[in-house]
Amino acid sequence: MRRFISGNDAFAEGVRLARPHVISAYPITPQTTVVEALSSMVEDGRLQAEYLHVESEHSALSAAMGASATGARTFTATSSQGLLYMAECLTYVAGGRFPVVMMNANRALALPWNIYGDQRDSLALLDHGWIQLYVQDNQEALDAALMAFAIAEDSRVSLPFMVNLDGFALTHTYEPVDVPDQAAADEFLPPYVTANKFDFDHPVSLGYSAGPEFNRYYAHAHHRDMVAAESVIDEVEERFAARFGRRYPGLVEAYRCDDAETVLVTLGSIAGLVRDVVDELRAEGRPVGLLRIRYMRPFPAAAIAEALRGASAVGVLEKDISYGAEGTVFTNVLSALARRGSVPPVRDFIGGLGGDDITREQIRDAFAELERAAAGEQYVDPVMFLGGAA
Amino acid sequence: MSVNARTMSDDELFYGHKACPGCGGALVVRQALKVLGKDAVAALPAGCMSATGFNFPQLAFANNAMITPFAATASVLSGIEAGLRAQGIKPDGCTVVGFAGDGGTADIGLQALSGAIDRNDDVLYFCYDNEAYMNTGIQRSSETPFGASTTTTPAGPSHPGCVTGKKDLFAMVAAQGIPYAATASIGYPNDLLKKVEKARDIRGTRFIHVMAPCPVGWGFPSSDTIALGKGIVDCGLWYLAEYEDGRFTLNRDPGRFASVADHLRSQSRYRALTDADIVTIEAHRDQVWQRLRQRCSCESS
Amino acid sequence: MLEVIWHARGGQGAFTAARVLGAAASADPDTFALAFPTFGPERRGAPMRAYTKIAARPIGDRSASRRAAIVVYLDDTLFADGWEDELAEGGVVLLNSKVAHPDARVVTVDGSGLAADILGRAIPNTVFLGAIAALCDAVTLENVEEGIRATMPAKLHERNIAVVRAAYDLVAGRARADALPCCSEAAPIEGASGEKEREASSVVSAEPPARIIPQLQELTVAPERFARSTCFQGGHLVSKNAGWRSLRPLVDQQACTGCFNCYLLCPDGTIYKQPGAGSSSTVAIDYDFCKGCGICAKACPAHCIAMVEEGGGRDEALHIRQ
């Protein structure tokens, strides 16, 4: 059924269709409307779940972990400072291999205090062992909610899953979304079956400590299974396409990259505008492309290197800055290129911080800058703040 | 049937742990699990009991048990309870139980505990109180008593040790209208067992604050743990009470207190106390008891 | 793409109108739309904006519109100099006002009056939905009615639809804006995959013994099995605690009265009950796990537990007095 709803509402519909047993969340702008929607669904019986009104984000994720440890399908949602307040628990949940699904409404970090969208919150937590997906529109948000449970709970993966929606640009923007029916969702998403839970016939210790002689085994298995998630993601997207007719492109989406001389790499909702600009410039005869990273973890280094194979200059457009270094997405993309063995001229365009608009003109300018870089123009600092900052 | 040494289960659900010899906290966990039985699901935050009970591959809990983030004992308990209930898989007689130290409860875990009581989640929470952060090496917590030397309130020329008193957790949880709360001490084991049994059979949030002397942190021989747990009650520096159905009950009112000085002088953490400090401690004890007696309907024993 | 900018004060329903318009346009399965407010702290009475974008293809640009074919002012106090800068060529301004405006591009409608007459409250937002349906091809009157039913609470449907119809009749034929471009299709893609069978992860299980107690055993599970979770058989012990002990408790079985005080108070649970002479019971100690703390010796009312130095004999017993 096609409905005109916000990103948060779309995500809530996806969560409803996944039938979680336990939802544990604490409100924060701009995540609030997703937990409001879920609360209404629990209240009026559309969703049979325990909704835990916890007193903080730290408790939200801790309770989610406790619930997951009983074998329950579990959901939480947060944003920004709330995500950071959860940070300690992120590593518990990931290391414990509890496939909790979280929606994070991407929002700036204080100070200065700011409620608007950027991606500094989740990108600061790339190393916490969660799968991280960045969606582009509300349909992808809803579909991601369903697929997130399927991927996270797959026994080959068993990892928590963070779906990132740009604050406001997705969470509070309305657009038409196809909401699948429950029977189709049930057919797509099997019940969560795991041995990683309490067992009353054969009791277990969960989440114990492990000293120096054992610790690396856990880290290695975590890493290996995160890498293995790549093929599970492909499988699940294949099944999703078969069931719902919507096909997602895997860990990255390359748009007109095949013969592109300059490519702009980005993630999240801004990819929509970059795509429009790519079409405009192509119409002007300029060979440009867009590479949208969907998954930052597992990080699709090979796919990125492959998509950028023909590019003479590569730019990264990101709503993030690792102070004193460069944007975190840029660091990761450069690593992918370096692994391949050759790095073309690169630029890091930092924009959209604290909800600042990234404009069509800025994206056109970014491509122009890449064209100059491809032509051999020298530069001192590849890190550029869109709109000027000095 | 009341649980005592003769009637209690032979099962040892907490065994082979690496707690120090004479550990009061370990005894709290062991005795509680004796009453709660094999279907208890335990959650423990960072602290002595998790550090000594859970180090792979030495796993000392024979029942289901789980480690939690330090601040999150109560919220993990809530999640476990909700998960079992939502799936309809909670066995009859299953108690979802937490064991956290005084720091993990009165300091970093207080917010989550308050949240669980607020929701009246069906969980039983034990605070085993050894009056400092013992797992990290005897640092002051908000349950460290006045005059106790710890590594962060060292006795020195300016102070005999900690200058603050114990945070009144019992009154705090009661103020939230919790269905059942109690204080206890391992020095009065039958009182403790009775309270665990009672708490086991009440629904909603239950809280038991158990005095659990620590030979290492307090500075006494490991054989004296029980004696210290009894002595601290007899001299009035700890008390045995309950809060149930909105009413306070004092389970033991010594009438005449045993010597505070004798009790304190048996522990090296109080080595720097002057006689004047002890008078201060006694005066404070008398204030506490005045309040206690006011709010309790006394049942002398 | 048709863009609409809504100017209003918080509480006048501009974002609701923006959403209804988007929902109305998306009633056509081949049409795409976005609706969003200015993302500020929402305070009643404060100036705010909302936006609706409608197109025949997915809309990439989620940023605020700078120029629009239709600019609506639900509150005429917000209509100020510079309004032309926001108006795209050929576009119209819809102004909530009783007074006509000299510029032909500005269409005035007494939205507050119309709403007060029909709704009983001067909330002018849906008036302008009727006006927009009358002015351009992006949405039909039927689409708007459907949008109201899909977006607003049921009790508001009837009267707001009446408002929309009245406004439509009032404005129809007065001016025209952009026409909506035609639509393209999104082709579903075939694909199939079987459901993967789920495999259990690494939990080792053992038959529970009659008396439940953690057991010494060897770690035989390989890292690739145990390290995929932190979930492992409870009560799995690989080392003894015997080495911790410098003093060993010795029980005088003859003197033991079977009171079980020592059993009750052992922090390590290493004292267990055993049958004594006749029907009596005594205790014994699991020296694999006893740490030698001495609590039992002090707890024994019959003084029948002695602490002796490890490696020494009974003669060297260090009897701890209670």
Image: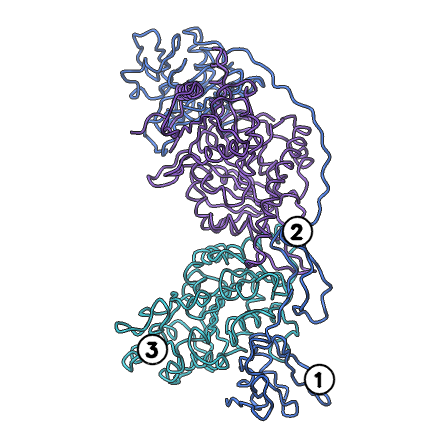
Chain colours: A purple, B cyan, C blue
Count residues near mark 2 (Cα–Cα under 10 Å), then give few for <14, some for 14-19, many for 20+: few
Name the residue nearer the viewer: C245 or C233. Answer: C245
**Which labelled disc corresponds to residue C224?**
2
**Which labelled disc corresponds to residue C216?**
none
Tag 2 and tag 3 share a subunit: no
Question: Residue A193, how many percent across, how many down?
Answer: 68, 47
Q: Nearer the viewer, mark 2 or mark 3?
A: 2
- Mark 1 lies on residue: C275
Quarter of the image for residue B259 reads bottom left
SS type, badge 2? helix
Q: Is residue C117 visible?
A: no
SS type, badge 3? helix
Q: Which quarter of the figure is the N terminus of chain A placed in?
A: top right
Amino acid marked by disc 2: Glu
Q: Nearer the viewer, mark 1 or mark 3?
A: 1
Badge 3 sits on which subunit? Answer: B
Count residues near mark 3 (Cα–Cα under 10 Å), then give few for <14, some for 14-19, many for 20+: some
Question: Residue A128, how many percent across, how many down?
Answer: 50, 45
- How far apart in space, not on screen, are marks 2 and 3 (Cα)? 60 Å
- Contact flag, marks 1 and 3 (Cβ < 8 Å): no
- How far apart in space, not on screen, are marks 1 and 3 (Cα)? 48 Å
- Contact flag, marks 2 and 3 (Cβ < 8 Å): no
- Left or right, B82 with reference to A116: right
Q: Is residue A67 above or below residue A13?
A: below
**Which labelled disc corresponds to residue B286?**
3
Badge 2 sits on which subunit? Answer: C
